[in-house]
Amino acid sequence: MSILPLIFERSAPGKRALRFPKPDVPEVAAADLIPPEYLRAEAPNLPEVAEVEVVRHFTQLSRRNHGVDVDFYPLGSCTMKYNPRINETVARLPGVALTHPLQPAETVQGNLKLLHTMEQHLCEVTGMDRMTFQPAAGAHGELTGVLLIKKYHETRGDVARKKIIVPDSAHGTNPATAAMAGFDVISIKSAGDGSVDLAALRAAVGPDTAGLMMTNPSTMGLFDPNVKEIADIVHKAGGLVYYDGANLNAIMGYTRPGDMGFDVVHLNLHKTFSQPHGGGGPGAGPVGVKKILEPYLPVPVVEKQGEQYVLDWDRPESIGKLRAFTGSFGVMARAYAYLIAYGPELKEVSEYAVLNANYVMAHLRKYYDLPVDRYCMHECVLSAKTLKNEVGVKTLDIAKRLLDEGVHPPTIYFPLIVEEAIMIEPTETEDKATLDRFVASMVKIYEEAKVDPEKVKGAPFTTVVGRLDEALAARKPNLRFKGSVGWASGALLLGLGARVGGSVAPRG
Ligand SMILES: *Cc1c(COP(=O)(O)O)cnc(C)c1O
């Protein structure tokens, strides 16, 4: 494949995708509508191209990108599963796509009903009492949840509670959230079996404990068997417990954070509930709470009064707003379609997510290290530590070689507590044949590393650009077009270089 020209390089003066008819209404000069200080002195430098060139440009770009609709995408902690197309049809219904968030409630009763009904369903799935759909992502949900915990203590005058406990197997966003909300973060080491060290937890709690944030299953892909006791220990010390439920597709229909004693939980609709994501697309991180936190939920809250759905803004103890309106409504519509499509069979999602991850783990443990030998949940964490010591082939090299197999690499070097980590999340939407093909690729790379390590270290060979200087691509990405064509092509190359490898830091 050749280097793709920039859209600016396709530009020629006077080319147009569209020609407007002469206006049949009086023209109004921009200066009559916009204050002069906001007006441009000269026209913007936009590419001038025909419609067919625009279509070809973006289609070609998309074909150089790996997505779930292209092939297997086992990116750990990200749930890159297939998103049913019927959800897209639902999200594009005029009543969903074309309503305005400022419309009076009586004109959007169906939309409010959707939010209200989905709140009830998700409270049922999580074992919580109320839910807000405002947060735009998982990490945003965490911030919302931790601010709710903060408000709870403040309202009670319990102002000495300045610390949030976070196990070292938590998702990286957990400690970041706690710090952002103004808490001191206390990290707790995991025990040898990957669960939270209860003795360390008992030693850490006290009158300064605001709460604990727990990712369960942890970033090791393991369910903590002591989860109820962990919640009890923190509660006895006067703290609240937060459940990072981003990966609910591991437990849905089997167990519920509410029943485990948790006070607040966030979900990632863009993982568990099938919203297209990656590349920073829209998501939603709804937050469910127990009754004790309900007064503090962000405004507005959707309520049902008689037969009418209303937006309730009159909540004096609310933490305020976290985002405009009620959140990303199109995301809710897709998640709702997914929820009702499954209904009571929702637990099958978890069954297959867990089965698939264990299937991959069972096959690959003969070749790669298994840091904790337990059944995993929706993802498994392996390591290439032995291979690296024996032949010098690192996890990064394996990830690069997988690109030649047409597979998106798993998450690598995460969780941080595992050396040379390879975190694989096949998701429930993959069939056995795909998993077998992936296992065969991983075995092939292992065997190749043993006989020809230099080959693996040189990968990838079949991608548009080969192995690049990762550090330079990440630290000094040159992504801005400044008009010089040669310079810009180099920048594009660097940009690609930053993207073609395994994902080092997982992003929802
Ligand atoms: C993905 C993920 C998050 C963060 O979600 P974003 O939507 O990317 O902000 C938090 N916790 C866990 C366990 C996750 O897997």
Image: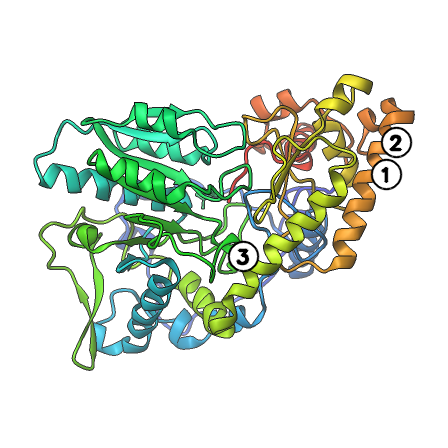
Which one is earlier in the sequence, the residue at label 1 or at label 3?
A: 3
Q: Which mark is nearer the camera, 3 or 2?
A: 2
Residue named by callout 3: 276
Above or below residue 167? Residue 507 is below
Per the model, the C-alpha gap separating discs 1 and 2 is 6 Å
- Dots 1 and 2: beta carbons under 8 Å? yes
Residue named by callout 2: 448
Q: Residue at x 15, y 53 (%)?
A: 295
Is label 3's Cβ within 8 Å of ligand 1? no
Q: Quadrant of residue 156?
A: top left
The single residue placed furthest to the right in the displayed view is 451
- Amino acid type, residue under disc 1 in the picture: Lys
Residue 124: % across, % down:
35, 65
Q: Residue at x 60, y 53 (%)?
A: 354
Q: Quadrant of residue 76?
A: top right
Instruction: Identify the element where label 2 is drawn.
Output: helix
Residue 242: % across, % down:
32, 43
The reply to whether residue 169 is in sight is: yes
Per the model, the C-alpha gap separating discs 3 and 2 is 35 Å
Q: Residues within 10 Å of mark 1 (few under 14, many from 20)?
A: few
